[in-house]
Image: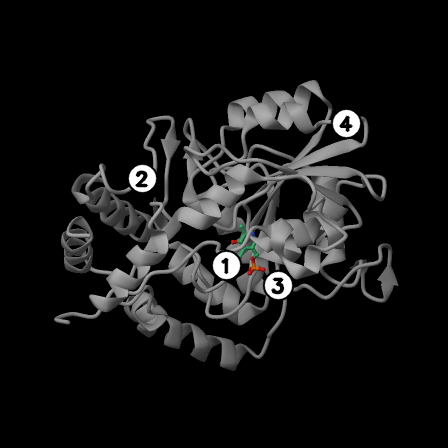
Amino acid sequence: MNRTVDYEKLSLVNKPFEDEFKKAFSRFLEKGWYVLGTEVSDFEKEFAKYLNREDGYCIGVASGLDALIISLECLNLPKGSDVLVPSNTYIASILAIIKAGLNPILVEPELSTYNISPSELKNKITPNTKAVLVVHLYGKACNMQEICTFCKENNLKLVEDCAQSHGAKFKGQTTGTFGDAGAFSFYPTKNLGALGDAGLIWTSNKEIADKARAIRNYGSHEKYHNKYLGMNSRLDELQASFLRIKLRHMEEITQKKRKLASLYLQGLDKTKFILPVVNPDYFDVYHLFTVRTKKRDELKKYLLDNGIKTDIHYPLAPNKQEAMKGILDIQNPTPIAEEIHNTILSLPCSFGSSEDDVKYIIEVMNRF
Ligand SMILES: Cc1ncc(COP(=O)(O)O)c(C=O)c1O
């Protein structure tokens, strides 16, 4: 073995920002204001600008999961309403629907994009369907033209799970701004990652924004007056100050990931690996760079033997998870999701990865 390549090393990702983080931490200590202060409100304004939608509202919350739960709660849907969600998503999207008192209905993705299939949506709608939760998986936008039309025609609410799609666009429009609400995670590994947990909701609807702002803070608009059954899901000042710093470098972070992805796309042997599709209507941000092969487990081991660490997103479909027994319809087969879960592999594509790492990985992979 002549080289070791980490899948992702967060200390390397954050190294370029350390001096700025230290200054922000000193300011934070001096100020002595720890939760929901000006760092949060400034970050909310700056993130709306980043989304190119300053006409809307951003509400910082404690995590991506909470951003999804609160977004869904703010839609005021009847309890037990069906929400269509992709069958191959990360468990958080489905947990959020359940925690909001709604009923997840799995919809198969397209095998080409790994995103929810607009034609499958049409097959799953019933009179109890009230909303769609799309997930822009791995950093690629869903087909928002078809999905928005479908929601409009069927009078369905639309929430976007943007945990993996910061800055990803469909036909020039940023993900998170198409539907009733966009839910973002700033978990440390995300393209815009905090140094702990954090999340945010974007909406253009003032009623949703007001309710979300209250729900994150015990359901209260006014101190000690509680209008809703809220929760404690406040974004803290320190994470907001770190996020503000990294947000100023988002262009650089995105370009680096796109550059690494372009090296893979050009260099990997397409007869051996199924690569992500590229389409000019989609601006992909490569939260993850994935390949597929029937020999996935063999490939993973071979790469590890050559010092290259990889990951699988995700090894088990949501309807195969123990926690979902009796909740998700396990009788209903999801063969496309299964195929993806059984064949997908995520390669190193971190802001902390180097072009040399990627060239080495390509060389090793093409010898597989
Ligand atoms: C698609 C998706 N949705 C939601 C979440 C939840 O975000 P968080 O971990 O910040 O709660 C994640 C994060 O891992 C995710 O990948």
Disc number at residue 274? Answer: 2
Q: CA distance from mark 4 to mark 1?
A: 34 Å
Confirm or reject: label 4 Cβ below 8 Å from ligand 1: no
Nearest to viewer (mark 2 / mark 4)? 2
SS at badge 2: loop
The mark that comes first in sequence, 3 or 2, is: 3
Q: Is residue 108 visible?
A: yes
322 versus 368 height, above or below: below
Nearest to viewer (mark 4 / mark 1)? 4
Residue in the image at 57% along x and 57% along y: 199
Q: Which quadrant of the figure contains the N terminus?
A: bottom left
Give residue 83's position: percent from left, percent from top: 71, 38
According to the picture, the residue beneath numbered tag 3 turns out to be 62
Furthest-top residue in this view? 153
Confirm or reject: label 1 Cβ below 8 Å from ligand 1: yes
Nearer to us in this view, 170 or 315: 315
**Amino acid type assigned to the residue bearing label 3 in the image:** Ala
Q: Is residue 122 left or right of residue 364?
A: right
According to the picture, the residue beneath numbered tag 4 turns out to be 126
The mark that comes first in sequence, 2 or 4, is: 4
251 versus 23 height, above or below: above
The mark that comes first in sequence, 1 or 3, is: 3
According to the picture, the residue beneath numbered tag 1 turns out to be 186
SS at badge 4: loop
**Amino acid type assigned to the residue bearing label 2 in the image:** Ile
SS at badge 1: loop
